[in-house]
Amino acid sequence: MARCERFVMASFPGHLAWVGPSVATLAQMSAPGRMRGLSMRDRTRGSALVMHSRRAPLSMSFSSPARAKFPPTSKTEDEKERAREALVRAFNSQNVSEEEIEWFLRDRRFDEQETITKLRKRLQWVSEMERIPLQGNVLAELQSSKTELHPKTDKYGRRVLIVRARLHFASQYGPNSNRKVVKHVLDEAVASLDPGVETIMVIIDLKGFSIANADLNLARYLIEVFFTYYPRRLDQLLFVDAPLVFKPTWLAIKPLLRSYAQLVSFVKRDDVSEYFRSPAEVPNDFK
């Protein structure tokens, strides 16, 4: 078997750190009988990574990460169609597209009442965000380079949002500006998805992160946004170069992520290139 390269997931001690075979080696290990050529040390570490990380940089999943993962439903096609018609009638005058109705129906297993409740929450949130003007602090924050929609897609065609955590200070622009910026960049990312691509990847660069950059209120808000207002859109969340000082923040937000914790990977700077088709498409922050 080829030499086992090293793949570093994080710099944290204990369960937040893992060093073992590369993703390419693990892909080989997934084939029947291929584990026999590895030492017990690498077998153990390989199994730990497969169990810990929902998605590895190289293509190891049976379905494309660019497609959203919706829960199964027991509804028949006739029941689904009746639910679609009911939702179109319910939101006919509220500027909700049929595509958005379909998305929320799929998220709620085509349960009419659950879908109506969730869509109404989103509409209320959109209305609140529209009352915050795109000027002043909001404009300054958008121009601060704290958040950026990468012009290139990743190797699966997903749009990539880059967050530079070291540039965030909770009191600098205020919570209303933070929330408006979140909506603005997520709307931009979703609106620019290519046909057949439904999900996005978020890369949080933790280089230079300090306690001054920690913001649990914003973290809780972001989790609510992805669960409630953009369900199933986030497919992968990378934390890059996480320092030890980030560990308390991670331990505080991990339980709030619930199933979304599966989407998190801790990686090193050099590993980010594995998520893109070519070196030229890798964000400059990680070259």
Image: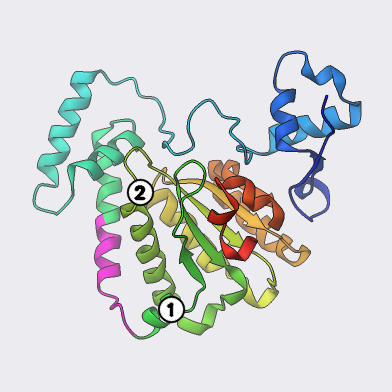
Give the side of residue 116 with respect to residue 74, left or right: left
Q: Residue at x 63, y 51 (%)?
A: 273
Up/down of 162 relative to 71, above or below: below
The quarter of the picture where residue 189 lies is: bottom left
Give the side of residue 248 with respect to residue 275, left or right: right
Of the numbered discs 1 and 2, the one sitting upstream in the chain is 1
Name the element at disc 2.
Answer: loop
The boundaries of the magenta stretch are 123-135
Residue 1 versus residue 159: which sits nearer the camera? 1
Quadrant of image for the N terminus = top right
- Amino acid type, residue under disc 2 in the picture: Leu
Residue 246, given in percent of the width and then of the height, sits at 71, 64
The majority secondary structure of the magenta stretch comes to helix
Give the side of residue 111 with respect to residue 24, left or right: left
- Amino acid type, residue under disc 1 in the picture: Gln
Residue 215, given in percent of the width and then of the height, sits at 58, 70
Q: Mark on residue 208?
A: none
Q: Residue at x 10, y 41 (%)?
A: 89
Can you identify the residue that label 2 sits on? Answer: 193
Residue 74 versus residue 200: which sits nearer the camera? 200
The quarter of the picture where residue 81 lies is: top left
Please say whether residue 221 is one of the residues in the magenta stretch.
Answer: no
Q: Residue furthest top?
A: 33
Residue 200, given in percent of the width and then of the height, sits at 45, 49
Give the side of residue 37 with respect to residue 198, left or right: right
Q: Mark on residue 143?
A: 1
The quarter of the picture where residue 143 lies is: bottom left
Residue 2 versus residue 34: which sits nearer the camera? 2
How dense is the environment of label 1, judged by Cα within 10 Å: few (below 14), some, or many (20 and up)?
A: few
